[in-house]
Amino acid sequence: MAGTTADRPDRSGRPDRSGRPERREPDDVRGAARRRLNANPWNLLLLIPLVATLFPAFYNRTGPELAGWPFFYWYQMLAIPGSVLVTLVVYRATRGER
Amino acid sequence: MDDLKTTELVVFCLLFGLVTVLGFVASRWRRAESLEHLDEWGLGGRNFGSWITWFLIGGDLYTAYTFVAVPALIYGAGALGFFAVPYTIVVYPMVFLVAVRLWSVSHRHGYVTPADFVRGRHGSSTLALMVALTGIVATMPYIALQLVGIQAVLKTMGVHGDGIVGDLPLIIAFLILAVYTYQSGLRAPALIAFVKDTLIYVVVIAAIVYIPGKLGGWDAIFGAADEKFNSTPPPPDGPSDGLLLADPQVLGYSTLAFGSALALFIYPHSVTGVLASRSRDVIKRNMAALPAYSIVLGLLALLGYMAIAAGVTPIGADPEAGIPGDGNTVVPLLYDQMFPDWFAGVAFAAIAIGALVPAAIMSIAAANLFARNIYKEYLNRDATPQQEAKVSKITSLLVKVGAVLVILGLDPQFSIDLQLIGGVIILQTLPAIVLGLYTAWFHRWALLAGWAVGLGSGLLMLYDTPNPLRDKEHFGGPLYPLSKLGFDSDSVIYTGLIAVLANLAVVVVGSFLLRGAKAPAGVDSTYEADYHVEAGDPQVEVSPADTGDRAEVTASRGGPHRA
């Protein structure tokens, strides 16, 4: 998405909103771009649940079994609390950030 | 109605009566000065905290149909049906960042529907209309399917007369639902969701604790399923079944999970749940907490294997003749067989009430789309908030009547087909909504063209998908063979994902060309800062009059366009 985060054209020609003070983009364009993409490194952790569950070739087998459950089933069930944990960590680490 | 199960029916009716009362009481709950405004009737006051949001969105996304159909799929096809688990795992991390942006910009501009946002961001009322229509068309069969869940339960309790008498309980149930939704708006499903989810948790946990012991342990359950799948050879060109995925299914499994996850939060009813919450923080917290429902869903899915081990045959099935029967009755039958009558009654009530919550939210979401993006946009541009709310309330009634007629008048299979189509077409609004949350660079005409291409190709591929198991030539399922696309492979892939890729390609290439040709771009009436506001920010002023900045867009139509 290169280019999408670039600065925008000057908007001063636009009509003002009725009854509302005009607000502008922050002057720090790179800061704005960073905010737009939520480029906090902590957010990258959110990729873990995706990688862990979207490649079935990795867990599409019966062994090792756990209490009678084939690996395919208990692995994916266990991925649920795992994903909760990751999301919670990111939530905590980025709390209050916009 | 000869073999009516009285105890089950009595417990069922008692619990159903309880939620009916709750539904009407809800209009006084967290009372607003007046419900005659879409923010109140349609979004419950935009003020739900973490707990209510958790119950509401959970009750919204994990529907009765899911609870009945996922185990039915596992019962019939095995591992493939378990895709619901990775699907509901990946969805939350994916929307964690996106949903808060949608919340902020909607909070800032008073948007009620996803189409409101599209209109404001891309400055195109045509695009907004298409997004609204897509949302309505995708949601309607979903509502009808909730009735299939109730029907499965009623069938199991022996309520299946001929003609209108047999359908009467279903009609009454939906009539009650329609009236209290009309009366209380989003507050009704929010309050009922507490009962629904508590019942579902109790019922599922009881089954997981109790049934395996009765059937000889998990070993025996998975063993029985394996035996069944091995004893029935898959049809030559049909989907294969088994405890594990067959090689050609692997890609289908992951793309189905990924594509369904992409679609889930652009369904209008999910957006309604998100926008009804109080703050960004509430949404983020919920994205971490909602997977608790996925655990229930995963356990529920395995009830399909328990049904195999317990020797359950679906109502209407004839294994000798190869007739599969109504697979949706598998879970109700399992409860009926395994538990005392009174508890089976509780389980059935849980499923039926589980149908009411999403049906109510979906009808509200569809009604809001109509009121905001069709009625106000095209029929009565000067509509007051009161008129808007009134139109939405009446539409929600009509939507539910429509759903009942569809189920009674047509083959239920038809609404299942429609729902399959719905998932594929709602995905085509992804570029306008989700990419739109990050950039206004994409040209409105390119977005429109991409939507049309995605829709057309998706429908074409679905039409071209047979299902030999069910003896169907068209709309046989959501997986499309790669070989038909010219690849040398026997793998299948989720149809919706191909369609949305085609859509995206058109959007990107089209935007380049249109911008190069200096075609007039839509006026974006949002600012980047709008996507970051949090409840209580000083600059937040939710004014009902600020609905998509119509005055501004109109005023600037003749003026300078953005490059």
Image (spheres, coloured by chain):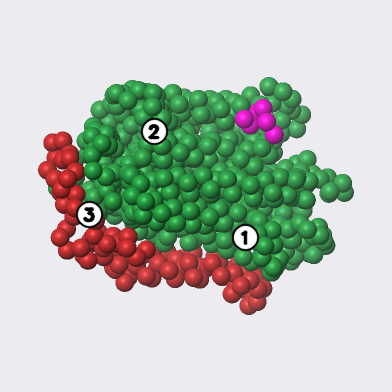
Chain colours: A red, B green
In the rendering, at what x and y percent does residue B337 appear? 71, 47
Which region shows up in magenta? B406-411
Could you tell me which chain the residue with mark 2 belongs to? B
Residue at image x 73%, y 61%?
Answer: B241
Residue at image x 56%, y 27%?
Answer: B402
Residue in the foreground of this view, choosing between B499 and B469 = B499
Where does label 2 land, which residue? B373
Verify whether residue B409 appears in magenta: yes
Where does label 3 land, which residue? A9
Q: Amino acid at mark 1?
A: Ile
Residue B425 as seen in the image, left or right of residue B225: left
First along the sequence among labels 2 and 1: 2
Verify whether residue A93 appears in magenta: no
Which picture quadrant has residue A30?
bottom left
Could you tell me which chain the residue with mark 1 belongs to? B
Q: Are marks 2 and 1 in contact (CB under 8 Å)?
A: no
Element type at marker 1? strand
The nearer-to-camera label among 2 and 3 is 3
Element type at marker 2? helix
Q: Amino acid at mark 3?
A: Pro
Q: How far apart, in angstroms, are the residues tagged by discs 2 and 3?
A: 29 Å
Which picture quadrant has residue B445?
top left
Where does label 1 land, which residue? B493
Q: Amino acid at mark 2?
A: Asn
Relative height, residue B61 to residue B395 (above, below): below
Residue B85 as seen in the image, left or right of residue B475: left
